[in-house]
Image (cartoon, helix red, strand yellow):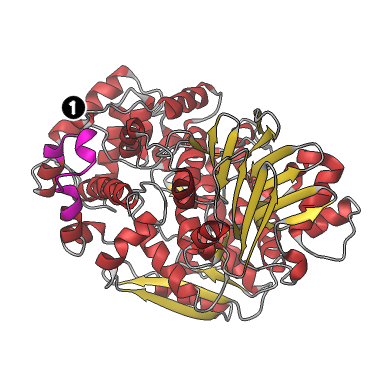
Amino acid sequence: MCGIFGTLNYEHAIAKEQIFEGLFHRGPDEQGCFNLDPVNLYHTRLAIQDLTVSGQQPMKHNGLVIVFNGEIYNHMELRQKYNLRAASNSDTLTILMLFEQIGMKMLEEFDGMFAFALYDTINLKMYLARDRAGKKPLYIYNKGASYVFSSELNILYRVCRPEVNYAAMADYLYLGHYYRKATPYHLVNELENGNYLVIDARSGVSEQHSWFKIEDAYRHAHHLNYEDSLSQLDEHLKTAVKRRIESADLDVGSFLSGGIDSGLVTAMAAQQQSRLKTFTVKVAGSFDESLLAEKVAKKYDTEHTVVEIDFADLANDIEKIISNHGEPNSDNSAIPSYYVAKAAKKYITVVLNGDGADELFGGYRRYVPFKHLDFFNPSQFTKISSGILTKILPVANQKQSLYTYGYRLLKFASYADLVKIYCSASSDLFVGFEDVFIEKPQMLAISADLERYNGYSISPLKKILLMDFESMLFSRLLPKMDIATMAHSIEGRSPFLAKEILDFAPGLPDHYKVRNIQTKPILRDLGRKYLPAELIDQPKRGFEIPLQKWVDHELREVMEQYLLAADALYPKIIRKTFIVQLMARQVRISDERRAKILFCVFSLEVWHKSLSS
């Protein structure tokens, strides 16, 4: 895992030291650059595979030059398949050799996470590409024939100084993250997952190609019985874990919670690597999942570390944690992710996680109603009656209670607009408070995608799973984990996002993912083969962080400094009186939503202030 940066037809001088400093945390082991007018490529390396000089980048081969961030886990298998021979075992070299043979069709062969820039010095073409899920980031500034691209927005902003897109701020606040290719800047887009860009170096003309669409997989059902599906899932996941361990020349560890996903990954990894290092988070005042995680650790004899997070330095660290993202980010789980990655770095450089399992196999409780009711197309009676009930019933405040669950169901059913339905079911921020916006959210891109998905002949459950993969996972959860791990020069690997699983999981029948009111039954049944019985029926919890407490106590002072500042940005987008009333608890809203909205707006302010620092 590394950091990449590059320019094409960019006329302004850039000091390589500026790039290396800005991306040093992504690659502290080596730094290199390639310059051949009109192209400049920069690379910072976190050495994981092929630790010798043969793995250095930018890498050259027969007129091709590449800077590559990520790992191709099956690259040695591809060398055998395509009869590729070289002294070096570098997966970067495999990319170059395979490109010679089959061009960008090679992407369909890769099981990996990647973002790369490959320059063909003979045909004068630049290729920018990303993996299926979008594990590895790539942002592109484009003005006319000029391009600048980077692994992170912070260094891209410092180099190019793009104009801030204030009109898009309302969309961020409403959804809680920037959707798909959108960023906070004009002329800067994120290259979307499963896409690559081809740029003619002479003219600057580009063509974007979509080489993988998970929506296609959702539209093609499997016809395997349950036993065969369970067996295939077992084999696919074991293969994915095995590849992610074998394609590292360093020890690989595992994040281990008390849940099914990380438990399965850890169990399979422990069968591949003796004395696997495992890490569990223990947060004071929340559910202690370390007790369940310890049962897995004992069963597989791992070197287990419980990371106790007390957040004593939170008030001092919060601005840095948010600013690391380079854009506003309302996902408060970025906070424990930052701290656990920091602790894990003391022991390991490569760590496995369970990212993607919930979005692929139906792990969230909110998926259950979509299995049984079509909230994307509710009847008129359902909308009217649900709307009346949500207005007269008491606001739900207990996060895990049945009443809260039922209250949210009524909210889903009361909306006619697809964007409202989805935002209510996912981030659940400003839905119902649209009147507080001065700059109205446009939500054009997400609205178009929701309309398209809703027109497919697939179930409501598949629609929300598909949307979560493309929105919550791609635009929010994966960037959060990438930034948290890379801030501490640690590489996170996600077996559930393997090529074979992404091809397999979407086509499974709904009742393999939600059975009555039980989430991800197929993963739970697989867990019975590997995990202690106590873990199997545990509910999905994730990081249960005390955001409500932080907003009112640990973070109150710093949040007030930002939210009540005379030069705050958000009053240009939403009414300041609403935020002031929220802070004073004068709005009819649950404690959880109140805290989430305040944190979302606070994150916007921290990011905006960081631009001038």
User: Relative to 345, does residue 580 appear above or below in the rendering?
Assistant: above
Q: Residue at x 35, y 38 (%)?
A: 172
Give the residues in magenta: 561-578
Q: Residue at x 61, y 81 (%)?
A: 275
- Say if 98 sits above or below 23 in the image: above
27 inside magenta stretch: no
Q: Is residue 332 left or right of residue 528?
A: left
> Where on the picture, by quarter, is residue 320?
bottom left
> Observer-nearest residue: 412 or 310?
310
Q: Which image quarter holds the C terminus?
A: bottom left
**Badge 1 local density, few (<14 within 10 Å), some, or many (20+)?**
few
Q: Which residue is mark 1?
A: 388
Q: The N terminus lies in which quarter of the figure?
A: bottom right
**Residue 495: percent from left, percent from top:** 61, 57
Q: In terms of depth relative to the viewer, which is nearer, 441 or 501?
A: 441
Where residue 329 appears, as percent x and y from the top left, is 36, 48
Say which residue appears at 47% left-offset and 57% top-offset.
483
Q: Residue at x 58, y 81 (%)?
A: 301
Q: Secondary structure at mark 1?
A: helix
Residue 146: image quadrant is top right
Say which amino acid is labelled 1.
Answer: Ile
